Image: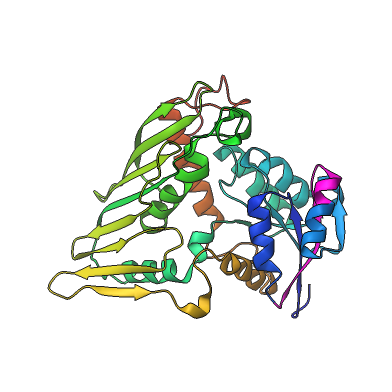
């Protein structure tokens, strides 16, 4: 790694890997030098598409490539523990997609491994790196709406998804919660931290994954968060934060907003709009820039996406799954995923 360029490896070749790589190659201080897939043919097609020099047909070869400064892990979350662990063990820094892992136990293992190997590790929670979300959090932290009373957020897709789809497959960590619900849960955590209590209800598929889930999180302060995710209906994907002195509404696409509205008692509404210079609302460049900034600064984690926060989110996701009865292969028989 130099001040001019950070060298990236891409592990996996699916849709999110392609979206991230497309944004990455546009950054002048980033260089994508290698890609890996379990299929060499898939890796080669991906490499040709993005002009990447090296294509590997196995993850281990990428992990051992000493020319790589950081690996972006974009496999299904059921493979995050194995893929990110392989890279950390080989001495690579890692940006790992969300949900970070299947459960908090696996997340704990990755964080411990990163500390043992003195490597950088970050969850790819791009929402936390979004400039407008950062502005919203700063307003809340500065007391713009007083003490938070409620948070509401939803994320649902219309589907339908056939039984063979990864979102219906327990072996791949299927279900609405880990794929979509991680956003509402992470949004609530960003503003309030880890809840003191979790209740939840879900509709499960024949395969045993959640088709839609509603969760109510509570905090000792008296704050509540009402969260919903679904694979059976396209929701408005909105969020609202209500405080003792006002409210902030994100009208749509709350995890990558182009605007939000601040309502303060006794004042006219204030609209905050994304800066066009920040690029399209679905840009993944902000998280890539944060990774490269942290690496150049010699940091082992990002203050925007701290590992303690990632672990807390995983504990909450575990607690929700515990309440609704979703278990993945390898977890069956465990008496408790996380403390209540």
Figure quadrant of residue 157: top left
Residue 118 forms part of the magenta stretch:
no
Q: Which residues are magenta?
A: 28-43
Residue 82 in the image: x percent, y percent? 72, 41
Q: Is residue 65 visible?
A: no
Residue 117 in the image: x percent, y percent? 75, 54
In the picture shown, does residue 319 fall above or below 248? Answer: above
Quarter of the image with the N terminus is bottom right
Residue 33 forms part of the magenta stretch:
yes
Residue 6 in the image: x percent, y percent? 75, 71
In the picture shown, does residue 120 fall above or below 330? Answer: below
In the picture shown, does residue 94 fall above or below 202? Answer: below
Figure quadrant of residue 20: bottom right
In the picture shown, does residue 242 fall above or below 28? Answer: above
Colour logic: rainbow
Is residue 259 left or right of 74 when viewed as pictured? left
Residue at x-position 37% and y-position 69%: 259
Residue at x-position 35% and y-position 44%: 227
Residue at x-position 86% and y-position 46%: 40
Is residue 269 left or right of 286 when viewed as pictured? left
Residue at x-position 41% and y-position 54%: 187
Q: Is residue 285 visible?
A: yes
Which of 42 and 92 lies nearest the eye of the viewer?
42
Number of numbered markers = 0
Quarter of the image with the C terminus is top left
Is residue 287 left or right of 275 when viewed as pictured? right
Which of 119 and 57 lies nearest the eye of the viewer?
57
- Seen as rendered, the residue at the extreme left is 266
Residue 261 in the image: x percent, y percent? 29, 68
């Amino acid at each position: 790694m130099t001040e001019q360029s950070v060298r990236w490896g891409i592990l996996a070749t699916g849709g999110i890997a392609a979206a991230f790589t497309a944004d990455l190659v546009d950054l002048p201080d980033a260089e994508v030098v290698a890609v890996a897939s379990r299929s060499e043919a898939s890796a080669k097609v991906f490499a040709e598409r993005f002009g990447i020099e090296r294509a590997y047909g196995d993850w281990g070869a990428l992990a051992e490539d000493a020319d790589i400064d950081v690996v972006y892990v974009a496999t299904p979350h059921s493979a995050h523990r194995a893929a990110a662990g392989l890279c950390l063990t080989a001495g690579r820094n890692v940006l790992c997609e969300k949900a970070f892992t299947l459960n908090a136990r696996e997340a704990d293992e990755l964080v411990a491994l990163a500390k043992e190997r003195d490597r950088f590790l970050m969850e790819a929670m791009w929402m936390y790196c979004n400039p407008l979300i950062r502005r919203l959090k700063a307003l809340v932290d500065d007391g713009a709406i007083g003490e938070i009373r409620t948070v509401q957020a939803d994320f649902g897709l219309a589907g339908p998804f056939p039984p063979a789809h990864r979102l219906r497959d327990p072996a791949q960590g299927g279900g609405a919660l880990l794929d979509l619900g991680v956003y509402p849960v992470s949004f609530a955590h960003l503003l309030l931290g880890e809840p003191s209590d979790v209740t939840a209800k879900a509709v499960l598929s024949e395969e045993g994954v959640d088709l839609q889930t509603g969760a109510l999180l509570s905090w000792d302060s008296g704050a509540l968060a009402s969260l919903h995710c679904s694979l059976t209906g396209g929701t408005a994907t909105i969020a609202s934060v209500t405080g003792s002195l006002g409210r902030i509404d994100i009208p749509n696409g709350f995890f990558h907003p182009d605007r939000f509205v601040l309502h303060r008692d006794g004042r006219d509404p204030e609209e905050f709009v994304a800066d066009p210079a920040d690029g399209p609302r679905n840009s993944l460049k902000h998280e890539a820039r944060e990774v490269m900034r942290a690496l150049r600064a010699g940091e082992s984690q990002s203050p925007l996406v701290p590992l303690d926060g990632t672990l807390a989110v995983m504990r909450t996701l575990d607690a929700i799954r515990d309440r609704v009865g979703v278990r993945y292969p390898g977890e069956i028989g465990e008496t408790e995923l996380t403390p209540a």
